[in-house]
Image (spheres, rainbow, N blue to C red):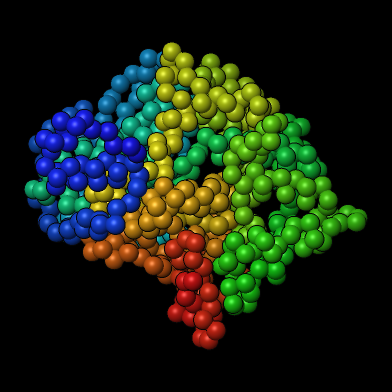
Amino acid sequence: MRLKMRKNQMRATPPLALSAAAAALLMGCGGSSDAALPQLSAATPATLQSCATLASGLALPDTRITSAEQVPAGPITVQNVTTQVPAHCLVKGKMKERTGPVDGASYAIGFEMRLPVEWNGRFLHQANGGVDGSVVTALGSVSGAAPLAPGLVQGFAVLSSDAGHGAPTPFFGLDPQARLDYGYQAVGTLTPMAKNLIKGAYGKAPDRSYLAGCSNGGRHAMVGASRYADQYDGILAGNPGFHLPKAATTQLWKAQQYAKISTTTDSAGLPDLTSAVTPAEFKLIGNAITAKCDALDGAADGQVNDVAACQATFNLQTDVPTCTGARDGSCISSAQKNVLASIFAGPKNSKGEALYTGTWFDPGVAGANFAMWHFTMPATRDAGAVAFLFSSPPPASVGAFTATPGMQYALNFSMETDYPKMFATNATYTESPWSYMTPPNETDLSALKNRGAKMIVFHGVADGVFSPMDTAHWMDRLQANHNGRANDFARLFLVPGMNHCSGGPATDQFDMLAPLVAWVEQGKAPDSVTAKARGAGANVVNAELPASWSANRTRPLCVYPKVARYNGTGDVESASSFSCK
């Protein structure tokens, strides 16, 4: 950035003030200063002062608190995981209630907050996944599979919301404001309300605020790091769909590729994508990847840690047997190899331009979750999301869309003429899907950095929908834009073998929230995070763990681009036998 000042201004400005102004402007360009970043102070605890009176005695702008009840300490079960939680106040409410001008539907930003009696002084905004649309339990389960210590258990006041629409379907995309709420404005609307509600409950506002989630929740967190850096001290983004419109359209493109090699049809006569590559064939590919890449990190332990080296070592064409006869799970056909090679490379248009980042070969391709995103989700989730949320304008009506099967919509989707609709606007939909869904200036996090806030991102290497390579490339660009100093405030952890937020042959149980707090409030930057396998005895057992692994295997997750490498001695089932190098 070039600094221009008139001579009289320069003469009128004391040298020290001029120096400070120049430094501030330079940092605003995304550069990194050699000066130490601000250190934020630690949160201090407090005790809940009131619960029942929050519903009647607290007036918050554009907010209607519908209930406030005391919940005793005890078990809460969410998605088959039972967690013992502390005594807390459960507050439910709605914000910005209105009627949509386009579809005449009722809209509001629904929310719940769980406020522990013994509070650690921190606020956690739990950003939810999918297309939102339901107020899930505000437990604060924001990192790793079947977490053992969610935010509420750690003492956070936790908020969750439906992001501005009351059903987990994409049809709210007919309403322009609901689109914006889903993209980013619900977070901006809820944040000051939540902080004021906390102040009313404890007598003080939160000392520290955190925004966290996985999948679309990870996208919310990434967007928050750009748009709401002044409101949050810590950002935790898991498997983030920060380029969600491109990823969703790529899902439809994948369906078209798999349709070329599908061998059966569904009841509507459309391709049954699950016949394109069977579970046995994905397992064959996963085993071949392991065979070629397992020892690259120094240990033959059935786990591939060195992802980058594996991409240069594994060759789909030569390392997986090619069928000369019928497919029986011991080989794949040349046609299958060509389709899979195209899918892993990522979509391109007729000009050869990449439309979304490809992804990595990793043993986790054998995971059931990986196949689900490739075969089931294009018709059942992505077709509707692309039509109503990531295209401008959306279909004329819900009925007009549902008259055609989702798979047919996927097969008809054009990467030449329909894909560009994510960048379009009109008189009704004045902000494009790409604009409202993605972080603005995603590689310039100067506002977050300069106030001492911190960001942790994690991503499963075998994510079947959001490209981990895309996230790694974002981190590379962030480093370049911040003069190689992005690790001072933002760190990426790749999780080998893990599918979308959890699952696959992986050590996928970990806590990133506590390390984030330690970094934000104590300056303890995390060089690694210990992750566990969910074998026999875990709160939820991972059925996809290889039989050769210990049920309690642990591994260090390393700051990208470092890799967990075996020290040469020690138990290969223990994280202590590996170092990040």
Q: Residue at x 76, y 32 (%)?
A: 269
Residue 6 in view here: yes
Residue 185: image quadrant is: top left
29 displayed left or right of 264: left
Q: Residue at x 35, y 47 (%)?
A: 31
Look at the picture and state if 497 lies above or below 415. Answer: below
Q: Position of residue 542 (x, y in %)?
A: 53, 64
Q: Residue at x 40, y 33 (%)?
A: 183
563 displayed left or right of 267: left
Q: Position of residue 107 (x, y in %)?
A: 35, 25
- As drawn, the residue found furthest toward the bottom would be 569
43 or 70, which is in the foreground? 43
125 displayed left or right of 144: left
Q: Position of residue 563 (x, y in %)?
A: 51, 68
134 or 299, which is in the foreground? 299
186 or 223, which is in the foreground? 223
Q: Position of residue 437 (x, y in %)?
A: 44, 34
